[in-house]
Every structure is written in structure tokens, then in C-alpha cells.
Image (cartoon, coloured by chain):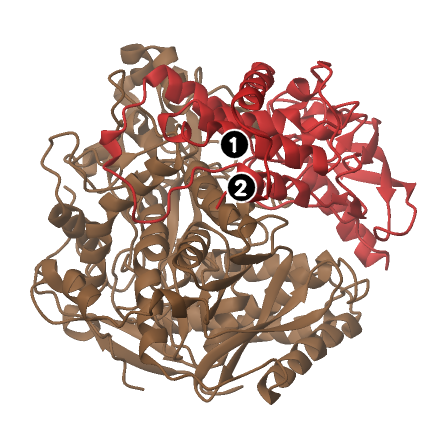
Amino acid sequence: MELKSNVPSGPIEQKWTKHKFDMKLVNPANKRKYSIIVVGSGLAGASAAASLAELGYNVSCFCYQDSPRRAHSIAAQGGINAAKNYQNDGDSVFRLFYDTVKGGDFRSREANVHRLAEVSVNIIDQCVAQGVPFAREYGGLLSNRSFGGAQVSRTFYARGQTGQQLLLGAYQALARQIGAGQVKMYSRHEMQELVVINGRARGIVTRDMVTGKVESHVADAVLLATGGYGTVFYLATYAKGCNGTAIWRAYKKGACFGNPCFTQIHPTCIPVTGEHQSKLTLMSESLRNDGRIWVPKKKGDTRPANQIPEGERDYYLERKYPSFGNLSPRDISSRAAKEVCDEGRGVGKTGLGVYLDFADAIGRLGADKIRERYGNLFDMYERITDEDPYKVPMRIFPAMHYTMGGLWVDYNLMSTIQGLFVAGEANFSDHGANRLGASALMQGLADGYFVIPYTIGNYLGSTKLEKAGTDHAAFKEGETFVAARVKKLLEINGHRTVDSFHRDLGKIMWEYCGMARNAEGLRTALEKIPELREEFWHDVRVPGEGEEINQALEKAGRAADFLELAELMCLDALEREESCGAHFRIEHQAADGEALRDDERFCHVAAWEYAGEGKKPIRNVEELNFENVHLATRSYK
Amino acid sequence: MAGNGSTSLMNLTLHVWRQKNRNTPGRFVTYPARDISPDMSFLEMLDVVNEGLILKGEEPIAFDHDCREGICGTCGMVVNGRPHGPRGATTTCQLHMRTYKDGDVLTIEPWRAGPFPVLKDLIVDRGAFDRVIAAGGFVSAPTGSAPDGNAILVPKENADLSMDAAACIGCGACVAACPNASASLFVAAKVSHLGLLPQGQPERERRVLAMVTQMDAEGFGNCTNHGECEAACPKEIRLEFIARMNRDYMKALRTLRPPSKAFAGAG
């Protein structure tokens, strides 16, 4: 398949402006004749649904949660980047663009990233206008903090609940349109199939999670904003319900999957305590502004933190990366934590942890100032671990957090299926091989508020769509597929629970496709995953019926898809024979242990195309050109 | 040092509300919860019980949950008569089993309130909250229409107080705790969050009227100052916001006509 990025010509800073002018418009009176399906109600989905409805399109929005306000964007803590340069510290659109391209280790598309940096400033304005209660200075102006991978203060925040407040802003804009009748909201509905007619996305099939009813929905365009697929690791900072089903259905219908192996492990999460663990909790990266990360210099030092003298501590990030120190990017910080733990210098019962110490900051600023900045995070930590971080250092360890990979999209955020658009974490996006902190919220809202409303309009304005209804054979086929799958899962009646399979899958992925990967391990995973999948389809037990609330059935459907998606991730990781950003191949590292890119062979996006059941997918390539930020070895030293 | 409390496993007895669906009467069923680690969250304890039920061929206990880090507002159950359990400022997912001791007996029920019908076991329908927000819980600021962020000055004190109110996660514990099943704390939190900011001023009066009208239409009761909502709120939303809502409502009644069709949905 030929991948057309459709990046406009011209200088990078003029591409988006020019493209906005060149795009087709839909006359205001005609917009109401079009219908658009939005799947997902997080930052990208809710902002897109609200903005499209404001323009006059008929929007149907779907989410698996009981309310659109609960999408997992809500859990983002630290902040959102914008190139406002309110701090007069040298920030600019170009610098945010530059930092993001470099942070992504040169594996993103320049034109998309530049557009992201451009609209970042509009996002802040939009959110302020909606009443998002951002942190303020005494003079009433907006406050900023710093984040990893940047040397300027460009992160806007609302205590440690920035994601919550931004999502509530988008949710309220969406609710306004629901009240006005411009959006029909379907909560507790899960997309189970994408419907493609004559090569164009024309609708979806859903399962009503309360009644079990399988229903078809037709539209002129479909937008997937269903988030990432990190729960493939079972233990992750994602919500329990986050899943890859919608994008996996789209993949199997012909949407290429971009860079599936690019998954981000976040350096600062609360360590695992036992087998019962159902999820991992993040401690915002913003804590690294004031916390210092260290481990004992000696192996196996079991003394409590406060009895280890200053001279016997190794502040390894400050030592190895003096210019960025504790604010080094996530991939680098995570790998550094793994290294010290592998050396036997990890802390806590399991030895899988490092200290994040606030003693210096409390001494310098006082406990009250620290409480004002991070109070809710400290409380959360205390609740989970039963330790008081005002008195003893936090213990943290890396955990699965974000997927840079996702469905491949062109400059218009359209996938390789005409009329199927993908926004937010669900697309392969703007973050290359590593995402910088406070950039996920920025991308979700950029896509939803400021890109999708233009590009979907352009598609509708320039496409002659034939009439289609839910009585079309393609919808009936979709309904039959969904009903048959539900029936099959319920009939296996084996000996193992869905969670036990999912946990095993997570262990395989963490072991062989986690923070450090090699060919041998990935080949092992590629043997183990199909075996586990085989066992799942023979031995899983899903109790209950299809025509009722059945949480075991919901989990089973998602796990079944993860058991396929995991294989594609490992395949992608195996064939990308280089290290870049979060994708660290042990065979490809520099003498000092840093990631070693291979720009000759891999300066491209791998976009995987489904080739049919049991067949090896096709690896298509989109070459990446760096004309504005020159390819260089990333250094944070 | 993890989980400073005892690391020995506990056995508990659970009386759990089981209800097949909205139209079938429910009942309590007793289950043992064995080998529970004090480091488990309350929901992880239920996961363990459910795994056991599935393997025995029984249906697992249905309960709503998602983020499991106390922010999405999805989870919620009444434990021994208290929404979200005994620990203050804590959602059920953040309640840990070290709060309990070996041999404890726990009664677990769904939110009990007319406007929150039970859908199954511990799952209720909180759609009423969404309808209250859709009635007026927003600032009308269509995408693209905003002035520069720093063009709107907000005194820090107001921004902080507004944020205190905006912290509401919409879980519904306030309704479950209230003897009148009043949603006043939930509605007041949104009215105050937006009413404290300059951006919220133009719609301040119509907002409070529309939201209160919808709240009443959904069948929530009145506030009679019991204060149970504040005690149950996992985000420590304060009762003073209800006073603020009442003040705004009285003022709006005097200056604006009651909400008519003309601005239902205030679009």
C-alpha cells in the first residue's frame, strides 16, 4: 500500500495556514445534512464532538463509561504544554516544535508536530474561556511549571488534576450540545465493529452494555478517539476499561497500524505490592520539579532512607544528565531506574523501586508550599502505600503509561480507510518514539478542537457519498459477526478466568517487549502469545448471559483483541532493528548505554497492514524527512 | 516498609447486595473473602472474590469502576452504611484493606436513591447528573471564540476556591449519603466553580436556575442541612458551596424569569 501523508507544500510555518485555506468548506446550511460518529469521549473525542456539533453537524458520540465525563483523560495529573512564552524565558512555537521532534527521537512527522505547537496557544485560550480553573499568580495571570525534556516553563496546570479540569471543560461543552440536541450521547455502549462500504467508513456496530443489544449506527464519517492500548500489559496506569478493540477492528478492516511497538514506560509510578495488583498508579512527572531521585551507592543497602548519609546516595539522573537532571525525558529516566535496580541497588521490599525525595524542597520552600503544589498527589501516595511522603521519600518505579503507536493517519488525521479519522492517543500521532510530559493533553485537544473540525469538513465537502442505511448488507454482516463472537465467548465454559489470561499476557509483554528488548526475547514472545491465545479460546470461562450487564464478557472481548494486538507489537519491535526513544533494543546501544538510532535504515514509520487471518501482516513504510530539525543524536547531558 | 501494617492475610465476611436487573427485586447474599492482603484495595478484594465465584460457576458481583486512582468517579458503594467506606476523603478504589481487620463483617450495597436506579448488583444509573450538567453546567464558549488566556485576570483566591469546587468527581456519594437524596452538593459545586470565575458571570443566573430546575425534575430531594454529603465526599467539597448556590438562586429568581423553553439547554 502506498502511504500518502498529504502534507501540504511550502515552508513549515505556513503549511497549516495554507492548508486551512485550501480545504473545502461545507456551507453552514448544509452541515445539518451530515452525520458524524465519534467513538470515545476523552479529551480528543469530547472536544471533537462538541466542536463539530457547534458547527452544525449531527453528531453521535459513544463511550463505554456510564458518563462521558469519566474517560481516562481525567487521570492526567501534571499539565498541558503551550508555547505562550508568558514566562519570558525564550519559548516559541518553533521551540516547542523542536523539543517535541527531538523528544520523540526523530520518529514523528515534522509537519504534524509543527501544527500541534502552533495550535497549542489556542488550546489554553479555549480552555480558559470555558472556565477551566488553571493555577494563577497573585496578579491574576496564568501560572506555569516545568516538565521533562524542556528547559522552559511552558506547562499550564490545575493543581495535580489538570486532565480532570480539561476534560470537564470539554465534557461541559459536549453536554451543552447534548442539551441542545445536536449530539446524541450513547454512554455504556462499546464499539464492536467498524462498517466499511465501498472502501469508506460508514458506521459502527455497538453493544449496549446494559441490555446486551447489538445495534448498527450509520454516518458519513467516523472518528475514533478511543485512546491507547497500554492495558495490553495488564498492569498499567490506564483505567481498567481502556482497550484496543475499536482500533483493532479498524485495523482488521484495512486501517494501517503505525509503530505499534512504540510504548511509553513512565518513570514515576507507585511500585507493585503483590499478585492481586489490578493497576498501577502514576505519580505526576511534575513531582520531578522538586523531588530528587536517588538510590544507595551500595548494593543491597537495606537501611531506611533517612539513615543513609548524603555521601552514600547516588543521585543518578543528576550525575548522568547534569543539564536536565531529574527532568530528563521519560524513556531515559525509566531506563536509568531499571539499570540501578538491575545492579541490585533498588529500594523497598521487592528491590524494584527508587527514591523520589522531597526533603531538600521541603527544607527550602516549606511543607506548605509543597502541599499547595502537590497535595493531592501526596495524599494519594499515602493512601496507597501507607507512608507519609512529607516524612519519608516516595518509592517509585517505571510502569506502562502511554502508547505513541496507533492507527496510521495522514496530515488530515484520516486513516488508510477513507472517512475513518483517528484522534488523540489512538492515532500514531505526533510523539514519535517517545512522548514528552504534558504533551498528551495538548495533542488530544489540538486534534479535537482545532484539526478534526476542519479536516472532516474538507472530507465531507470534497466527497460524493452514496446513500447508506443500517439495512445495508455490510451492517447486517457486522451485527452477525458481533453476535457470533459474544456467543462463542459465552459457550467456551473453560477453567480459567479472563483476568488470569490477561495477567499472563501482561507478564509476557513486560518481560519481552517492555523497557529493553532483544531479538531472542521478542521471538520467544512471538511463540508464547499465539499459544496463550489458543488456550484462551479453548479454556476461558465467561459466566452469565449476553443480554444483560456482563462485565466478564466485556473483559473477555477486550482481552481477546489484546491477545492479537500484542503479537503485532512484538513483530514491529523485532523488525525495528535500532533503538529509538522508548524502543530500546539491547543489541543497538552506544558505548555509554544510550539508544543508538539507525537513520539509514529506520528513519520511517512502520505502518502494518492486515493481510488476513493467519497471514503475516505487511510492513508498509512512510519515509520521514527532517528539513527543519536536523537529525542528531539526542543528548540531555 | 510497604504497607506498614500487618502483612498477615485476613478473612472477612461480606453481605453483598445482588440484584439481577432494574426490574427484579434484590437481596443480600453472604460470601467469604479469604486470604485478603492488607495492601489490596477494596476493589482488588472484590476482584479476588469474583475470581473465586467465576471458577465456582457463579456470576461475579457487578460493580462500576474504571480508573482505580480516585479521579474518574465511576466506583462507589455503601460499605457498612457509609458511601465509599469509613475513611474520609477516599473513594472506594482508594480504600485499602489495611483499614479492616481479620474477622470483620462488611455489608456492601449500591447507592440508594430514587434518581439512581439500580441496574445490576452494585451498579446504578447516574444519568441524572449528566442531564443536570446538560441543562446549564457550562460556559457557552464555542471553539475558536476565545480571547488570549491572560486577557482574563482571575484573582488567585478566586481561582483556588473555584478549583476547590471544580474538584468534584460526580460519583454521587453525596446523594447516597443524604437522607433526602439531595444532589445539592453536586449541583452547588458546579454552580460555584463557574460562578466564581469571570468567564462564568454572563450565564451565572440562568445557569443556577436551569440546573436547580433540572435537579428537581430528576427527583432529587431538598437540602435540609444534615451535612452528610460533606462528610461522605471523597473530594472534600464543602457545604458552604450550597449556601453559595442558594444565594445565587435567590438572586436569580428576583432578576430573571424562571427558565422557560427559550433557554432550556441554553444553547
Residue shown at the point (56%, 16%) measured from the top left: B247
Foreground pick, A379 / A424: A424
Three-letter amino acid code at the position of disc 2: Phe
Disc 1 is attached to a residue of which chain? B
Q: In the displayed structure, does residue A75 sit left or right of residue A365? A: right
Residue A544, image x and y in percent? 82, 62
Labelled disc at residue A483: none
Chain painted red: B
Could you say which quadrant of the image residue A580 lies in?
bottom left
Q: In the displayed structure, does residue A182 sit left or right of residue B4? A: left
Whether residue A544 is situated above or below residue A173 in the rendered picture: below
Labelled disc at residue B263: 2
Q: What's the colour of chain A in the image?
A: brown
Report the label total.
2
Labelled disc at residue B206: 1
Q: Quadrant of the C terminus of chain A?
A: top left
SS under mark 1: helix
Residue A438, image x and y in percent? 32, 42
Whether residue A57 is situated above or below residue B198 in the rendered picture: below
SS under mark 2: helix
